[in-house]
Image (cartoon, rainbow, N blue to C red):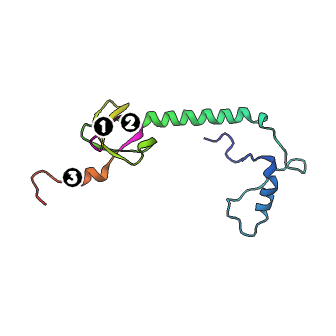
Amino acid sequence: MPITPSFVFVRADRLADLALVLRLPINPHPPFSLFRHGGRVPLIADREIANLRSMEADAADRAQRAARKAHRQAFTPGQEVTCNEAAFIGLTGVVEQSDGKQAVVLFGGALRMTIASWRLTHNPVQEGNKPAMGIAA
């Protein structure tokens, strides 16, 4: 969550580029303006916004932790899951066991990994296409 959602800080050496973008007849960027105070664009040292950046990073960390906690879920053994982060993104595996915080997943019948449950989603496409028992195709 941005602390100052309506402000973007740029390096002073890019100020001329921003002024040029503002003069373009067709601007590919969202509308923006340069903040002016006392007839000029104020220059702010990095050290002056260091605390602001730190607060913003802390807020982002808290939001990510809350999202991870909210997404914890137990999977049932045999359930097909897809990994949505890290090195296994997009891979489908089968849950061997799960406690809600993490799951042991078998990928390709050979690679067994313990993965945090917030990194997994159930695979509804695969689960919806399982044939009903006793029905021949």
The vertical placement of 17 against 81, above or below, is: below
Judge by depth and name the residue closer to the eye, 7 or 23.
23
Mark 2: secondary structure: helix
Mark 1: secondary structure: loop
> Gap in Å between the C-alphas at discs 1 and 2?
8 Å
The vertical placement of 123 against 65, above or below, is: below
The reply to whether dot 1 and dot 2 touch (C-beta < 8 Å) is yes
**Range of residues picked out in magenta:** 108-121
Q: Please, what is the three-letter code of the amino acid marked with disc 2? A: Ser
Q: Please, what is the three-letter code of the amino acid marked with disc 3? A: Lys
N-terminal of the pair, mark 2 or mark 3, is 2
Quadrant in which the N terminus is drawn: top right
Label for residue 75? Answer: 1
Give the residue at x 66% y 39%.
3
127 lies left or right of 135: right
Give yes or no for residue 115 being in the magenta stretch.
yes
Which corner quadrant of the image does residue 79 belong to? top left
The residue under label 2 is: 117
N-terminal of the pair, mark 1 or mark 2, is 1
N-terminal of the pair, mark 1 or mark 3, is 1
- Outermost residue, bottom direction? 25
The residue under label 3 is: 130
